[in-house]
Amino acid sequence: MVEVGSAVKLSVSGYRARVGEGFTPESCLRFANAFAAFLAQSGGRTVVLGRDTRPSGLAAFHAVLSGLLASGLSVHDAQVAPTPTVFYAAARLEADGALMITASHNPPDWNGIEAASRSGRLLNGSEREQLHRLFYAQSAAYTRWDEQGVCSPLPHAVDQHLEAILELPFVDLEAVRGAGFRVVVDAGQRCWSGQHTAAAPAARLRCGPAAL
């Protein structure tokens, strides 16, 4: 068993640790169990789950998904997506919570899980304290065979998020089109490195990518 004490950082950004030390499938399952127990306190039943493209993300995804489903939660799988997209999807679907497997700006030997409460809202201070207590208490509330959760894919979460941004009343598409902006995008190793294309929004802005 991996001891998670000093190897894990629990903060406003959720749970983060070095891969293979504090960040393991076991600790990811433990965090998912704690989150499921946290949601159960308010009758929560649905979660949106996403991840970035870190090499450790896929194993973490399966560990987290197992904990959520075994706890009776229904999971909407946003697949590889940016954190704001996952939390937006939670709001759009009126989910009871959201988990994003990412360590944000940390180097690739780190990973983590960011948590949001009802409708994609970030946890407040007291909610974070509750979640942290459940994590360290190794809380779990697995359900019977006929109460297991189900997983449903959200294959177009990124494009739906971008379309929603373009439809905001203060976004002037004609002004953007006419401004002749040239924008450099460094996709790095995150959620835009070949995983998604913003085809529909780019078409509406009448712009396209050009390799440098």
Image (cartoon, rainbow, N blue to C red):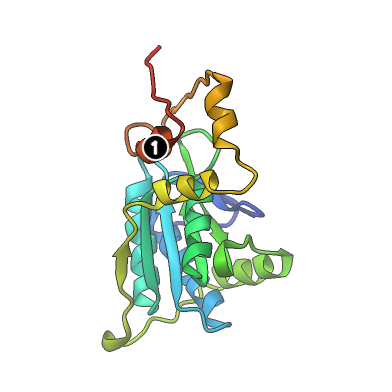
Q: In the figure, 100 relative to 121: above or below?
A: above
Q: Where does the image place residue 31, in percent across and percent down from the top left?
A: 49, 64
Work out which residue is located at the far left of the displayed protein and give it: 145
Q: Nearer the viewer, residue 41 or 131?
A: 41
Where is residue 99? Give x, y as percent.
48, 59
State whether residue 169 appears in this view.
yes
Name which residue type carries label 1. Answer: Ala
Furthest-top residue in this view: 212
Q: Picture coordinates of residue 210 (x, y %)?
A: 38, 17
Measuring 30% from the left and 66% from the top, which residue is drawn there? 152
Q: Is residue 142 left or right of residue 129?
A: left
Query: What residue appears at the point 33 percent right and 49 percent down from the top-left corner?
Result: 58
Identified at 41% across, 64% down, the residue is 29
Quarter assignment of residue 48: bottom left
Q: Is residue 30 above or below residue 82?
A: below
On the rendered structure, is 84 left or right of 209? right
Which quadrant would residue 212 be assigned to in this image?
top left
Q: Is residue 193 above or below residue 36?
A: above
Picture layout, residue 57 above or below residue 153:
above
The residue under label 1 is 198
Tell me if mark 1 has few (under 14), some (14-19) or many (20+) residues whose alpha carbon lies within 10 angstroms of its own: some
Tell me which corner region of the image, top left, top right, bottom left or bottom right, holds residue 67.
bottom left
Quadrant showing the N terminus = bottom left
Q: Secondary structure at mark 1?
A: loop
The image shows a total of numbered marks equal to: 1
**Residue 98 as seen in the image, left or right of residue 60:** right
Judge whether residue 3 can be spotted in this image.
no
